[in-house]
Image (cartoon, coloured by chain):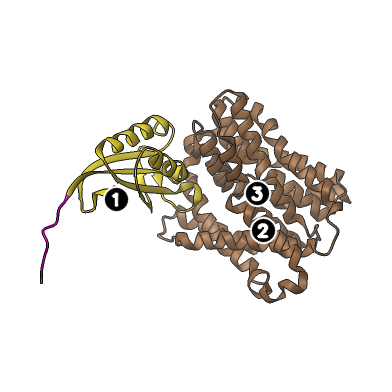
Chain colours: A yellow, B brown
Amino acid sequence: MHTMALTKHARQLLVIIAEAALEKSLVRDVKRLGAHGYTVYDVRGEGAMGVREGEWEADRTIEMKVICEAQVADQIAEHVLNTYAPNYAVTMFFAAVQVLRPEKF
Amino acid sequence: MLDVVVFFFLLGVIARVVGSDLRLPEALYETLSIYLLLAIGLKGGIELSKQPMAALAPQVGAAILLSFTIPFLLYPVLRALRLAGPDSASLAAHYGSVSVVTFAVVTAALTRAGLPYESHAALWVAVMEAPGIVSGILLARLAKLQEVRWGALLHEVLFGKSVLLLLGGLIIGAIAGVEGTAPIKAVFIDPFKGVLALFLLELGLVAGGRLSEVRRFGLPVVAVGVLAPPLLAVLGAGVGVALGLSTGGVAVFATLAASASYIAAPTAMRLAVPEANAALSITAALGITFPFNIVVGIPLYIGLARWLTQ
């Protein structure tokens, strides 16, 4: 079998774990701030704001993954930190990732 | 004796309290809530198809006004209990809006007691969900708490799933009528009470999980959760009598006034008043008021309605 050498490109992965009530706002924000895409899952867990079991609507938590340019990730994170973190359960972290099709991100 | 569906709620609470691993899949919760909202709407709509709409205007107007007024009545009381402004506004909104499941339980209890109620009562529920939330937001706004994106919020409240499904069901039922809905009767009408029982089991699990929070918030929240419903029920019953409703109708109006929302209001208030402590409102509405209403309150409100209309 013929294999091609894969060309990998450095990008930033930003993970935002937040109350599900914020999903619509977060989607709007990340697109406005320059992300080309995102992925959202339903999750459950516990943190500084208590247990969030996700058993029903008002107790649901989402995890949003955004892969983008490093400065876009920084902008999004700064916006989320200023806008939502004071009053909502929000956790964020970054990871360096490598992607194959850089134009997608 | 308590209605059989209430026992399912208690089973759920007990399961949580004893630390059982019982958990209904989230998808089932979603399915059951969609089913209940559609079924309640359809039932009301089928009855609506039998009568002229215009005669209902005063009732609809009174229901909207009642839901809108309740937060304004509660807010000063909550402030006097030393609750913070945002918390008071949010909690008041939860009590202004209504609980669809509490409505389902009171109608089940009335049917069992052989007390007829206005068959279009689902219409009252549909119009009482949003106004209380709007006035809660107004209260928060008047306290100059923060900017509100009214457009997005009204969209959320008016086209959120519960109002959409209730009104959608009502309209479908009203258009299709008894004959048109006959083919779906076996799914939407007949198994209603069994589905309600299953949903109450789930709500028992959720409410049981809030019990540990009750201690955290202390006496004022317990007092509000237990005292507000009967007082609001008296107000609701008064409005029902003034409208000339039947005994069952007065009981339904009283129960709606006494009930607190734990589905639409928490989501809306989370977005509109982020400073408010969401756990406080949910604990009061779902952990205290909901169990109080379905176990103790509803029999009281039916008694009150009987006494007022005899």
Q: Magenta region: which residues?
A: A2-8
Vertical arrangement, residue A101 with respect to residue B140, above or below: below
Of helix, strand and loop, which one carries label 3? helix
Q: Amino acid type of disc 2?
A: Gly
10 Å crowding of disc 3: few (<14), some (14-19), many (20+): many
Residue type at mark 3 is: Asn
Q: Quadrant of residue B229?
A: top right
Find disc 2 in the rendering and name its residue. B168
- Dominant secondary structure, magenta: loop
User: Could you tell me how far apart the alpha carbons at marks 1 and 2 are, in whole angstroms?
Assistant: 40 Å
In depth, the one of B174 and B7 nearer the eye is B174
Whole-angstrom CA distance, mark 3 to mark 2, is 27 Å
Residue B272 in the image, given as x and y percentages of width and height: 54, 35
Tell me residue B63's x, y (percent). 76, 44
Give the residue number, with chain letter if any, for mark 3. B293
The foreground one among B280 and A33 is A33
User: Which residue is pictured at 63% across the width and 46% down the height?
Assistant: B158
Q: What x and y, as percent, mark residue B283?
A: 53, 42
Tell me the tag on residue B121: none
Q: Are marks 3 and 2 in contact (CB under 8 Å)?
A: no
Front of the two marks 3 and 1 = 1
| SS for dot 1 | helix
Q: Amino acid at mark 1?
A: Lys
Determine the secondary structure under disc 2. Answer: helix
Decide if residue B108 is in sight here: no
As drawn, the label of residue A104 is 1
Q: Subunit of mark 3?
A: B
